Every structure is written in structure tokens, then in C-alpha cells.
Image (spheres, rainbow, N blue to C red):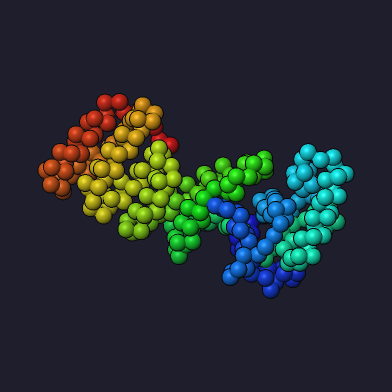
Amino acid sequence: MIDRGHEVADSVSETTNLTLHLLGAWRLDDGVDEVTTSSTMRRLLALLALQGPTNRFAAAGMLWPDSPARRAAGSLRELLWRTRQAHPDLITVGRDTIALARSVRVDAPMLRSAVERLRRGPARTVGMSDDLVELCTAGDLLPGWSEPWVETEREQLRQLQQLALELLAAHRLAQHCPDEALPIALAAAAAEPLRESAQRIVVRAHLAMGNYSQAVIQFERYSDLLDDELGVRPSREFSDLLRQRAVEGEDPTVVIGRFTRTLDRSSELAVAVDF
């Protein structure tokens, strides 16, 4: 798969400034205005953006799966001609392969590239919070599209969006920036409310900021949701995170008591559920 997130423009299209948005909704823009395309052009561009340089025969089969091979190949030739006539800088066409122009930025590969940077550690994440959070909260890949080559990528990217939010929030905590970590962690928890790893980062951020009562409230809400939806409780590791802070005795008695009541109730049916 080709990473188009940071590639430089090739000689064919070095003057363009096009961005293809596939997350949330399909949109092609030049930085100012939306670029008009037909529905078949959209499917072609989305395919090339997700698959990278693609064999002509394979592309025709994916775009027209119900048509005979010869008819599909003819439909592709016509579509390529119309696309190059309308937008010369969008695609490159070779004898056997077709590809999206290297200068076209695509949000989905940009997300993949960002996650790779996150996996290398906190030092790689400086200055990337706002753009990455926007990518992670933009929505699913091409909602409403039912093509198999879209559906496969959709679930993978959904998981990457979730992972990126959690990694970024965890890195901000490691950098002693809980005020920056909290909204990112909350976005992760909102996207996957039953996912304990996201909820745990929210609680850790509250604790790092000294918001002990808010940490308890978050834990209680999650515990109740988990019980209602799955009939289980948060993991013992999650419970111990709060119990340890409660024992430190830095909070008012009422808050410590609330910690104890919450954790005792959770421990009754505690199971190791670590999403």
C-alpha cells in the first residue's frame, strides 16, 4: 500500500494542491473549493487511493464486478479518458497500471502514517495533535459505500483511529500534559464506550490533574455501562488504579469513601476484561 501522506509531487502534477477526503464523506478539494467529479470518477479515485498503483485488469474487475471482463475493461478505458480530460493532474496511466497522482494528498494514508509515528514514541508526536485528532474523529471510511474493497479498509481504519487517539493521549500523559491528554482520551472513550483502555486513560488524566472525584464518576459510569451491556465489571487492574490513589489519602474523606464504595462494588464481579 502506498503512503501518500508525505510524498512530494511528481513532475506531472507538481503544481496541484489537491486533497482527497475519504474519512467521514468523499470530498476532493484544491484547498479552497471542492472539485466536481462524477460518481464513477469518485469510485475510481477512491480505489486508487486505497489500493495504490493498481493493475488495469484488477481495477476493472473491482469497479465492475458483475460485468464480463472485456466489457469491464472497456468501461475502465472510457472512464480513464474522461477523468484525464476533466482533471489531467489526478491520475497517471501506464501500460499495465493506473495510479493516483503522487501529489494528491489522501487522508486515510495520512492517518496510517501518523499512527506509525505514534508507535515510535512521544517525541514523534510534537505538533501533530490537532491534525491527528481531526483525522481520528472525521468518521468512518466512505460511509454508505458497500464495495468489498471499501468494507475491508473501513474496519482497519476504524481501529487505527481508536488506537491513534489512545496512543496520543497516553503520550501526552507521559509528557506531563494531562490537560491536553484529557480531551483526546474523552474522544477515544466516546468513540468506543465499552473499550476499557480508552476509559482508563480518561481516569488517569483526571487523576494526574487532581480531579479525583471526576475520576470516580468516570469509573462508575463505565462500570455501570459495562454491567448493563455485557454483564461484567471493569478489570481488577483498572480498579486497582483508583484504589491505589484512594489509599494515598490526599483527598477529602468523602471522596476516599466514595472510591472505596465504588471499588468494593466493582470487585464483587471483577473479571479481567482489557479491550
Q: Position of residue 198 (x, y in %)?
A: 39, 44
On screen, residue 77 versus residue 144, left or right, reads right
Q: Is residue 114 visible?
A: yes
Q: Is residue 112 visible?
A: no
Q: Position of residue 202 (x, y in %)?
A: 34, 48
245 or 112, nearer to the observer = 112
On screen, residue 155 versus residue 92, left or right, reads left
Q: Residue furthest bottom?
A: 15
262 w.r.t. 213: above or below:
above
Looking at the rendered image, the quarter that the C terminus falls into is top left
Q: Quadrant of residue 97?
A: bottom right
Q: Determine the residue positioned at 12% across, 47% down.
A: 252
On screen, residue 238 versus residue 141, left or right, reads left
Q: Position of residue 106 (x, y in %)?
A: 62, 58
123 or 234, nearer to the observer = 234
Q: Position of residue 264 (x, y in %)?
A: 22, 31
On screen, residue 115 versus residue 73, left or right, reads left
Q: Determine the residue positioned at 63% across, 45% down.
A: 145
196 w.r.t. 87: above or below:
above
